[in-house]
Image (cartoon, rainbow, N blue to C red):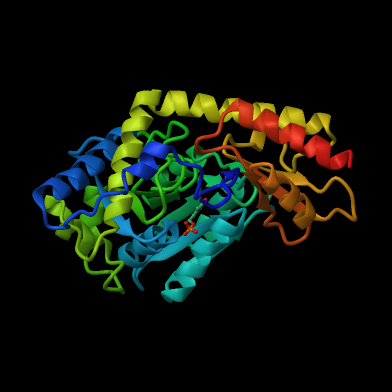
């Protein structure tokens, strides 16, 4: 057995032994039992989203989270449309990269990475660009740990009759998101974030009426969201599905429910985060975001000193059972700690002790 360590990363993350064990089965993809599992997963995801099956559907898509995001953007917009992207991190930038790759019309609104998008500035942009038809933004910006407030932009979309696309990759399942109330048209997340499955597919919570009016816009075959939706009507995936990942996700959803669903998971993550920020402050590690912007999933910390060797610290911590994450800021030396997955306050306390030991070397 290889050396094991827990992942203090934003996903893939540490899963339970039972989720991993669920993968020790080879499943046939056209088998009725397997199709039922897919259908159950789709129904449970809608439940977690608090969305009715009347108005919304959930669609599973092979690949990592970005495949799900690209599937939506490349399937529901065409040259008649224009996407306004709100970016305050690398995942917001990726939305722009996707739109560019598909040669779509888009406007990129860039905010500083430590600040929320400004609704007044965004309103002004809508005035300057009346061609904008869709707004896309990231909920939990994993680059920094910023939890973006969706509500002001959801309101703008309602007011201006725009479609609203939300990358909720690292937040869905870990915090309440009022999909129906915010009138989100497409929400994207993946198996390996707060729902604590293993990587291999993403999923889209989509408003059915919006899906219907965007038919015919897809510009790829494999990522065609409408074709995937149509093909999945009886639980059969269009192309080979990641069977082991699907079975593991079924188990992960059972454990999510047993824990107490979103409220319990949110409480555990938020508890972890509170302890992390406080403990780190005590040992002189300052977080990059202000408290009001900090989400409960991942946090960014400044290097404690200029000549700090992240790789050396990483190796020291890994030997003691934890993997941490490098920073993703271009202009500043930082590192990140994720608190999602099978991570508990004891882990954060242990990590703090290891860091203390490292700094006193
Ligand atoms: C994880 C994540 C993604 C998807 O990244 P992949 O590497 O494709 O899994 C997208 N957006 C956010 C905010 C994420 O945290």
Residue 232 is situated, as x and y percent measured from the top left of the image, at 17, 55
Extreme-front residue of the structure: 1
Q: Taking 221 as reference, is 230 left or right?
A: left
Residue at 17% x, 57% y is 29
Count of picture labels: 0
Residue 326 is situated, as x and y percent measured from the top left of the image, at 68, 54
Q: Depth check: 81 or 229 in front?
A: 229
Residue 124 visible? The answer is: yes
Quarter holding residue 252 = top left
Residue 131 visible? The answer is: no
Q: Taking 293 as reference, is 76 left or right?
A: left
Quarter holding residue 52 = top left
**Relative height, residue 19 to residue 326 (above, below):** above
Q: Taking 61 as reference, is 118 left or right?
A: right
**Relative height, residue 276 to residue 358 (above, below):** above
Quarter holding residue 361 = top right
Q: Depth check: 125 or 148 in front?
A: 148
Residue 216 is situated, as x and y percent measured from the top left of the image, at 22, 69
Residue 20 is situated, as x and y percent measured from the top left of the image, at 38, 44
Residue at 49% x, 50% y is 12
Q: Depth check: 252 or 273 in front?
A: 252
Q: Depth check: 229 or 218 in front?
A: 229
Residue at 86% x, 53% y is 308
Residue at 90% x, 56% y is 307
């Amino acid at each position: 057995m290889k050396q094991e360590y827990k992942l203090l990363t934003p996903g893939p993350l540490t899963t339970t032994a039972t989720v991993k064990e669920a993968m020790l089965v080879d499943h046939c993809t056209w088998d009725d039992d397997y199709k039922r599992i897919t259908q159950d997963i789709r129904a449970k995801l809608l439940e977690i989203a608090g969305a009715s099956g009347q108005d919304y559907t959930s669609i599973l898509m092979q690949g990592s989270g970005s495949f799900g995001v690209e599937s939506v953007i490349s399937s529901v917009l065409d040259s008649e449309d224009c996407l306004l992207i709100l970016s305050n991190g690398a995942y917001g930038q990726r939305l722009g990269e996707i739109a560019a790759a598909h040669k779509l019309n888009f406007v990129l609104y860039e905010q500083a990475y430590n600040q929320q998008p400004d609704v007044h500035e965004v309103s002004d942009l809508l005035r300057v660009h009346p061609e904008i038809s869709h707004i896309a933004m990231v909920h939990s910006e994993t680059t920094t740990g910023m939890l973006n407030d969706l509500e002001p932009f959801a309101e703008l979309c309602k007011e201006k009759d725009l479609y609203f696309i939300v990358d909720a990759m690292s937040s869905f399942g870990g915090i309440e998101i009022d999909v129906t109330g915010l009138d989100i048209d497409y929400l994207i997340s993946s198996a390996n974030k707060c729902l604590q499955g293993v990587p291999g597919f993403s999923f889209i919570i989509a408003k059915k009426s919006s899906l219907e009016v965007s038919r015919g816009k897809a510009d790829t075959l494999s990522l065609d969201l409408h074709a995937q939706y149509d093909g999945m009507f009886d639980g059969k995936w269009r192309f080979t599905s990641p069977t082991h990942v699907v079975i593991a996700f079924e188990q992960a959803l059972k454990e999510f429910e047993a824990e107490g669903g979103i409220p319990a998971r949110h409480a555990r993550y938020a508890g972890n985060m509170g302890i992390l920020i406080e403990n780190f402050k005590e040992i002189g590690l300052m977080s990059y975001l202000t408290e009001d912007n900090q989400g409960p999933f991942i946090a960014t910390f400044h290097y404690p000193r200029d000549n700090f060797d992240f790789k050396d610290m990483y190796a020291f911590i890994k030997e003691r059972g934890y993997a941490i994450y490098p920073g993703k800021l271009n202009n500043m030396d930082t590192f990140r700690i994720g608190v999602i997955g099978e991570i508990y306050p004891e882990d954060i306390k242990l990590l703090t002790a290891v860091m203390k030991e490292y700094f006193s070397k």
